[in-house]
Image (spheres, grey):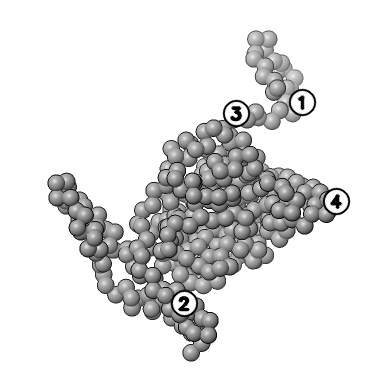
Amino acid sequence: MSFKDFEGKIHHFRDGLNNKKMLINLEDVLKINIRQNWLKQIKEIIRNAKHMQKDVEMEYDGMLHIKVLDRALPVDLPFSESMLGGCIDWEVPLGMTRYGFVNHDMERGHITLAGATRKGKTVFLKLLITSLIHQQPGNVKLTLIDLKGGLAFTRFKNAKQVLEVATDLDTARSALERVKQEMDEMKGWFDHNGSEDIKEAGIETRHIIIIDEAAQISPNIITGKEEKEKARKCEEVLSEIARIGAGLGYRLVYCSQYPTADVMNKQIKQNCDTVITYKLRDAIASRVVLDESGAENLPLPGRAIYKTPDGSQIVQTPFITNEQIEELIKPHIIIKTKKEAPADEHREGKADRGNSFKFEEM
């Protein structure tokens, strides 16, 4: 049998190791305080015990190694500000694995992020944005594109690090065209100064572009000639960002709730070195994102598969509340003035009233 034969049967190994319906840790039982609500404590132990499943990792280096991981993953992982204290430079808190807490380094490159509704994808996006604003307030720039209405990014729109929050194809197209223009200027500066990439140039600024939802920007899904053309131009810019943006300081986070071959642009996906996926509806969607099944079997909201060129891990990502987000980004909120109205907006018969306030940007 080849190593791929064993990898193809990894779910059978997991099933064999987890044939017990419940596993209760004796140490947890001994910690019960009988002077308090002991029945509630027992119920909590049982609730956690249902998800204390072992996992398996395999590798081959001339000999087949099968590693059995029995460290339990938490069922719930509330966010705490101390998680940010463990992050260095462009790291953001990712969550708890069977080896301990891990962070993700945004310098790795682009990210593909997937997950069905209410499984943790949007919460992770908000955690990502909050962490970047809090950790790198003077160096990060954010372009946020949410074609589901923009509600998830509402509280970030007045942060000084957020250049734009686009909520439809028109604003998404204009935002991406501005990113492309900026990227072209950056590329010209690199060529002129003989710099190979952002690190050699010594530039600390990073521009993060987040696209949520990819299906709403895919010309293969959208109907109508005009709308298809807008989506095609958006996808064209995204492909260029994915292809050459990483070395210029641009990071793409490409998200989808319903990943299919039609939705997930192949060129963009291939240039995303990191994949984070929450529970998906079936094995087909999992194979589109991960190139393998498994995401359809994730048991809990917040539980994800984290895959990099170094391998993949199961991780429980933190849950951050809106109150925590607002507290962390509060120092970076500014009042952004609206764009000036066109000169012809004051039509005939619509003269300004003499006692009207006039605001002037200083």
In the structure shown, which secondary structural element does the residue marked by tag 3 occupy?
A: loop
Q: Residue at point 44% right, 45% down?
A: 82
Q: Which mark is residue 58?
A: 2
In the structure shown, which secondary structural element does the residue marked by tag 1 occupy?
A: helix
Of mark 3 and mark 4, the one earlier in the sequence is 4
Does 228 sit left or right of 254 as displayed? Answer: right
Of mark 3 and mark 2, the one earlier in the sequence is 2
Mark 1 lies on residue: 343
Q: Residue 30 at x, y = what percent?
A: 19, 58
The amino acid on which the numbered mark 3 sits, given as a three-letter code, is Ile
Mark 3 lies on residue: 335
Q: Residue 41 at x, y = what percent?
A: 21, 52
Estimate the spatial distance between the alpha carbons at disc 2 and disc 4, rounded to whole Å.
48 Å
Q: Residue 72 at x, y = what percent?
A: 35, 63
The amino acid on which the numbered mark 1 sits, given as a three-letter code, is Ala
Estimate the spatial distance between the alpha carbons at disc 3 and disc 2, rounded to whole Å.
53 Å
Q: Which mark is residue 192?
A: 4
Q: Residue 253 at x, y = what percent?
A: 60, 54
In the structure shown, which secondary structural element does the residue marked by tag 2 occupy?
A: strand
Does 137 sit left or right of 185 as displayed? Answer: left
The amino acid on which the numbered mark 4 sits, given as a three-letter code, is His
Q: Residue at point 59% right, 43% down?
A: 136
Q: Residue at point 58% right, 68% down?
A: 309
Seen as rendered, the residue at the extreme left is 35
Q: Nearer the viewer, residue 207 or 156?
A: 207
Between circles 3 and 1, the one closer to the viewer is: 3
Between circles 3 and 2, the one closer to the viewer is: 2
Of mark 2 and mark 4, the one earlier in the sequence is 2
Is 252 situated above or below 138? below
Whether tag 2 and tag 4 are in contact, CB under 8 A, the answer is no
Whether tag 4 and tag 1 are in contact, CB under 8 A, the answer is no
Of mark 4 and mark 1, the one earlier in the sequence is 4
